[in-house]
Amino acid sequence: MPVLQQTPVISYTANGSVTSFSFPFQVLDLDDLNVYIDSAPTTNYSVDGIGEASGGVVNFELPPANGSVVRIARIVIPKRTTDYVEGGYVQAETLDADFDRLVMMVQYLDAVSLKENSGGALDIESRRLVNVSDPIGPQDAVTKIWTETSAASSVAQAITQANAAAASAIEAANSAIEAAASAQAAENSANGVSGFIKITSNDDTANNLDTKLVVTGSLTKTVLDSGNDEKLQLSFVESNNLKVSETDTTADKLNNKLVVSGSLTKTTLNAGANEQIQLSYTETVEVPVGIVSYFATSTAPAGYLKANGALVSRTTYAALFAVIGTTYGAGDGSTTFKLPDLRGEFIRGWDDARGVDTGRAIGSAQTDQNKSHTHTGSAASAGAHTHTIPKSGGGESSGASTWGYAENTYGAQPYTGSSGAHTHTLSINADGGTEARPRNVALLACIKY
């Protein structure tokens, strides 16, 4: 059977889920099939289609990782297993099999060998060369690591020579730098606020920045990462800024070497040679989203919304929506949500299973209420007594009511019958307004978004 014209190598990029990968070339023997994942040989697979002219399928036990490269190649082992006997019979099937293997060997060599392009140069066809030795002759190919190492060595040598030429000038200037730093440190110490500054030097000269920055007094210097591209931490006491001076004939050298970020800003006070840099340090406090604050103004400050129950966008205020969700109302159910409405309200701490204010969910509201209670009232007892009735002489009884009078030297004195000790019912009048409240001051409630 003739061997079809085929390329015996194929590659795929795995997606992390596919386990079967086809190969469109004939493989006579399983030992001739080689499978790689990211250039590493693998054996965790089975094969269908050995001997088929159109090819077959490699089936992995587990899907190769997403992004990995699966390479399937037919590499016929260069050996001859048939021994032809002199004067013996040669069967066409045996001879055909040997020629098939030879053709397959040539097909693989053709697929992986370098081709000459139209200009006569060898075309590597975007493939990589690995395990290349370092160059010796002027026309030898070079590797990536050799190029980077050689370039870095040349740059370092040039920098070392330049620094050596400037070393004497730097040494002479150090005393002046110390004096300026000491005076600045004293000024910073008087301001009374502590802080740190980290400065990074991108320089191939070991400890260059450490050597050039001299500090004294309350200003201290800590080397965080010595060597090339070192990092320094300046610890100091300050209120607004720190000044660092550089005595150097190279214009703007200190400005170029000091790299700052975040809450630390850099200002050039004296550009050019012998420049002076001012480092300003601002301490920031992160306010968590969803915090409620009260302000003595009628408008919400930047970064806040009035806690007035308004419906706001879930997209525009995504961070706030992620915190409170629909606790205070779902809005239109898709694009908006409701803010808490704290206008005219007193705040009560959530019970959170304590048992004082049970049955409450976070964000729930209560109406005003007084605790149930009673009032007692009584009139002072006057004891048994009588009441006099003015009348002249005599006495009379009528039904259940009895009255009479007694005579004395001066005349008659009427009186009523006794009703014994008793009390009288009192009516208590209502007092107060439409709600129960303590003394208070009205402030604007806002929520951070």
Image (tube, grey):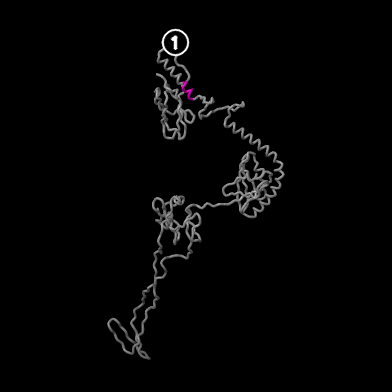
Residue 218 image position (x, y, % from top left): 65, 50
- Left or right side of 249 for 300: left
Q: Nearer the viewer, residue 282 or 146?
A: 146
Determine whether, in the image, residue 312 is placed left or right of residue 227. left
Categorize mark 1 by other alpha carbons within 10 Å: few (<14), some (14-19), many (20+).
few
Can you tell which quarter of the image residue 85 is in?
top left
The quadrant where residue 137 appears: top right
Highlighted magenta segment, given as a residue range: 105-111
285 on left or right of 59:
right
Q: Secondary structure at mark 1?
A: loop
Name the spot of residue 229 as percent of width and height, x first. 61, 40
- Queried whether the magenta region covers residue 114, the answer comes back as no
* Position of 307 relative to 65 (above/below): below
Identify the residue at image location x=39%, y=51%.
333
Q: Can residue 24 be seen in the rendering of this structure?
A: yes
Residue at the extreme left of the image, as rendered = 399
Q: For the stretch drawn in magenta, what is the main secondary structure? A: helix
Please say whether residue 107 is one of the residues in the magenta stretch: yes
**Amino acid type shown at disc 1:** Val
The residue at 56%/48% (across/down) is 262
Does the image show residue 42? no
Residue marked by disc 1: 85
Q: Residue 119 at what x, y percent from top left?
A: 53, 26
Residue furthest to the front = 118
